[in-house]
Image: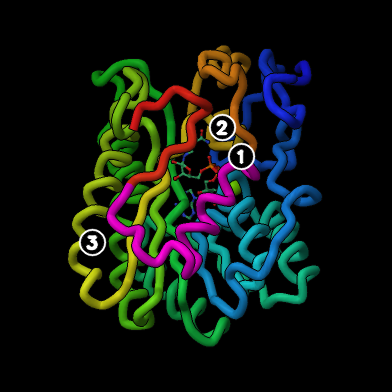
Amino acid sequence: MTSGNNTSKHYPCPPFVEQPQQMPGLASEMKPIPDHGETSYIGSGKLAGKKALITGGDSGIGRAVAIAYAREGADVAIGYLPEEESDAAAVIALIQAEGRKAVAIPGDIRVESFCDTLVERAVSELGGLDILVNNAGRQQYCESIEELTTAAFDATFKTNVYAPFWITRAALRHLSEGAAIINTSSVQAFKPSEILLDYAQTKACNVAFTKSLAKQLGPKGIRVNAVAPGPYWTPLQSSGGQPQEKVQQFGADTPLGRPGQPVEIAPLYVLLASDSSSYASGQVWCSDGGTGVA
Ligand code: NAD
Ligand code: MG
């Protein structure tokens, strides 16, 4: 790992060391540890008094969003898998350090009844809901369609497509005018890799879901947007999201020559959740190091 000098700050650049993990992977096991804004994100009250639920808020992009939202004045509930408890505990402590309410809700969003429970717990423990971030995701690469099992295909669609539908449907009766829904899609929706056949399809689904729902909820004053990240340095990639040789070169093929750190995409989620972007809805917002695919 070397230090990049292609932007005003120095961020880690490839090559990275080999670092296989079991799915879902832990941020604490990554080399280097991603920057989720723990010491670098500075808030300014943009989300003061709001209440947010973020799925996959334990690590990666979701963790960066959770830290940023808390520093902007929001109370935050995070969903995650039980095996990610140590990553989640670190996020909960950071939210509490801001004097905000933090709610930890472990469970598997591939199960419809848990999605209902997730929303009900978030609403009752936060005392309402203003912002929903559908961010949890499953990405497991597979070289050939002939090797892609129905179980794997199903798990990717359950996590990335069914769960945002179930969670959003359950959340809707708690959301009122001014609320915001943000879905994490991917550049894979527009430029699918050959080894991400199932994943890329789900990320295209996230785009259509966002655009359709924005039309449905506009008359209620609820905005719906999607964020499409390019390569970001998170455990999703090293725990089977990419072959290890691609992890070692992750982000090298972007104009900035490196992967994004999760903290670098958090401001987009803050903006889309805040009242200042009150006319932005039904759109996909890309942050991909300069490739410009969306
Ligand atoms: P991540 O591994 O840190 O976060 C994904 C989270 O999803 C996990 O922490 C886990 O808590 C959650 N999750 C997965 N399966 C779950 C299940 N069955 N039940 C409950 N929670 C579950 O990785 P990340 O890269 O920050 O991923 C966040 C989102 O960003 C995903 O939707 C991913 O598709 C998207 N994305 C990431 C990249 C990237 O390069 N990292 C690029 C484009 C899009
Ligand atoms: Mg995680």
Q: Which of the pair 149/87 is nearer the observer? A: 87
Please state which amino acid type lies under the numbered disc 3: Leu
Q: Residues within 10 Å of mark 3 (few under 14, many from 20)?
A: some
Measure how far apart labels 1 and 2 are at the Cα level.
5 Å
Query: In the image, is the residue at mark 2 within 8 Å of ligand 1 by its beta carbon?
Result: yes
Q: Which mark is residue 239?
A: 2
The part of the image, by quadrant, that contains residue 125 is: bottom right
Query: In the image, is the residue at mark 1 within 8 Å of ligand 1 by its beta carbon?
Result: yes
Q: Is residue 228 above or below residue 190?
A: below
Given contact means CB atoms under 8 Å apart, are the residues at marks 1 and 2 in contact?
yes
Q: Is residue 18 left or right of residue 277?
A: right
Q: Residues within 10 Å of mark 1 (few under 14, many from 20)?
A: many
- On the image, the x and y values in percent for residue 227 come to 42, 46
SS class, disc 1: loop
Q: Is residue 142 left or right of residue 90?
A: left
Measure how far apart labels 1 and 3 are at the Cα level.
31 Å
Residue shown at 73%/30% (left/top)? 8
The part of the image, by quadrant, that contains residue 217 is: bottom left
Q: Earlier in the sequence, mark 1 or mark 3?
A: 1
Please state which amino acid type lies under the numbered disc 1: Gly
**Which stretch did the figure color magenta?**
262-283
Residue shown at 70%/37% (left/top)? 34
Q: Is residue 246 left or right of residue 187?
A: right
The part of the image, by quadrant, that contains residue 76 is: bottom right
Q: Which of the pair 83/260 is nearer the observer? A: 260
Q: Residues within 10 Å of mark 2 (few under 14, many from 20)?
A: many
Q: Which residue is mark 3?
A: 213
Given contact means CB atoms under 8 Å apart, are the residues at marks 2 and 3 in contact?
no
Q: Which of the pair 149/264 is nearer the observer? A: 264
